[in-house]
Amino acid sequence: MKKFITTLKNIWKIKELRDRILFTLGILMVYRFGCFVVLPGVVPEVLEQAASSGGGNDLFGLINMFTGGAFNKAAIFALGIMPYITASIIIQLLGFAVPYFQRLQQREGESGRKKITQITRLLTVAITLVQGGAYLTYIMSQGAVDPSVPTSIFWFSNIIILSTGTIFAMWLGERITDNGIGNGISLLIMIGIIATLPGALVYEFTQNFGLAFVLEMVALFVVILATVMIVQAVRRIPIQFAKRVVGRGSNAMPAAGNRDYIPVKLNASGVMPIIFAQAIMFLPAYLLQFMAGSEGTGTGSALLASMNDFTSAPYNIVYFILVVLFTYIYTALMVNPQQYSEYLKRQNAFIPGIKPGKNTAEFIDSVTTRITLPGSIFLALIAILPAFAAAFGVNLAFALFFGGTSLLILVGVVLDTLQQIESYLLMRKYDGLVKSGKLKGKSGVQGIGASM
């Protein structure tokens, strides 16, 4: 405890770090305030009642958690930062497939990044308009609109407000990145997830007071430790630089080659496979809503209903398989063995026992393929852990913190933010946040945090 207090004092002594932390907290408070400002013409009580009657185990409950409860409140930040995340993912995928975006990302430097940022913002507006229209349709279908408000005025005003709210949230995230601490977009997502934690924790404590609650806390602690290990784990491929000749003439002598390594992450794809798999898992929910308006009954409708329940066996089996598949696909896009091989050749380096060129690329590819299998399985297990927690009697709101996208985002963003704070402490000759060594790596939100 004494070391913790000393560390807090050291953080407060660094003016730049102190100002950045206070600025970040102020921006997060503004964002949370916007999550409680209700859209005009909406009756939020009706919407929350309709959401609670659904049981909380449908996919709309997941959306509500990522927006910090703003989705069920019909707030101006009801869509949160998710349209911007979707746009960033689309642009990132286009960078792998479309030559124009490849040039912008890899060859045109700062000007290319500015163009990508501008395109991402425009795409965010387009996605927000589409998702905003779908969200307003959902509100009207739940009967949560004041009947005295004309439909045309309700649609026109709220589609503008929702779009403005998302753009403003995006701007807040960029301000945190520029003037605060940590990645702003990732922090906005994290604060939305954390906002639901106190209520879920208190409810779980009142329902399972005693030994059961202690065991749940121990299980959650073990799951968090395992997630940190997966996020930070790397397979080090040793490399050696060729020997150099030092001196001239008779005094010339070979200098020993330096040794280094290529860090290949166990989970190179980060949280992206879970995001992609979850996006596909939303399709049955939309189909179920479509069938509800028709005569969709019977076995097909029952199967779709089970696919809309993240605690059901069919949902988790399909979800597990999709996460494993997308982990392989996204890792293949992210890790390019041929680029590693060419880079080693340019640096006059090699992998001991492996011939340069094609053999090096094949070796790196085989190593990546082997470690991706356990990485994908571990990631898929984390993705479906909330269903197991719910099966053991944990309430649904609290069970979501036992795994899935929420836990990976929380762990990744916290590690990234702590790493930045530690760098400030080490630069000022203070002790770091850990007793020995220092925090390693970037956050596990690679596809989200890094691309923002």
Image: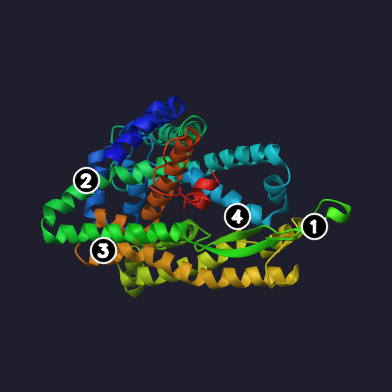
Percent of width and height locating residue 250 = 87, 55
Q: Given the image, on which type of amino acid does mark 2 rest?
A: Gly
Q: Which mark is residue 253?
A: 1
Q: Measuring 65% from the left and 63% from the top, which residue is drawn there?
A: 239
Q: Given the image, on which type of amino acid does mark 3 rest?
A: Ala
Q: Which mark is residue 21?
A: none
Choose top left, top right, bottom left or bottom right for residue 143: top left
Work out how far the residue at label 2 is from the one at label 4, CA to CA, in angstroms: 37 Å
Q: Nearest the camera: 117 or 133?
A: 117
- The numbered mark, 1 or 3, whose residue comes first in the sequence reads 1
On screen, 24 above or below 225?
above
Label 2 CA crowd tier, 10 Å (few <14, some 14–19, many 20+): few
Work out how far the residue at label 3 is from the one at label 4, CA to CA, in angstroms: 33 Å
Of marks 1 and 3, the one in the foreground: 1
Q: Which residue is mark 4?
A: 93
Q: Given the image, on which type of amino acid does mark 1 rest?
A: Met
- The residue at the far right in this view is 249
Q: Which mark is residue 199?
A: 2
Q: Given the image, on which type of amino acid does mark 4 rest?
A: Leu
Secondary structure of the residue carrying numbered label 2: helix
Q: Measuring 26% from the left and 61% from the top, which residue is drawn there?
A: 219
Q: Nearest the camera: 91 or 157?
A: 91
- The numbered mark, 4 or 1, whose residue comes first in the sequence reads 4
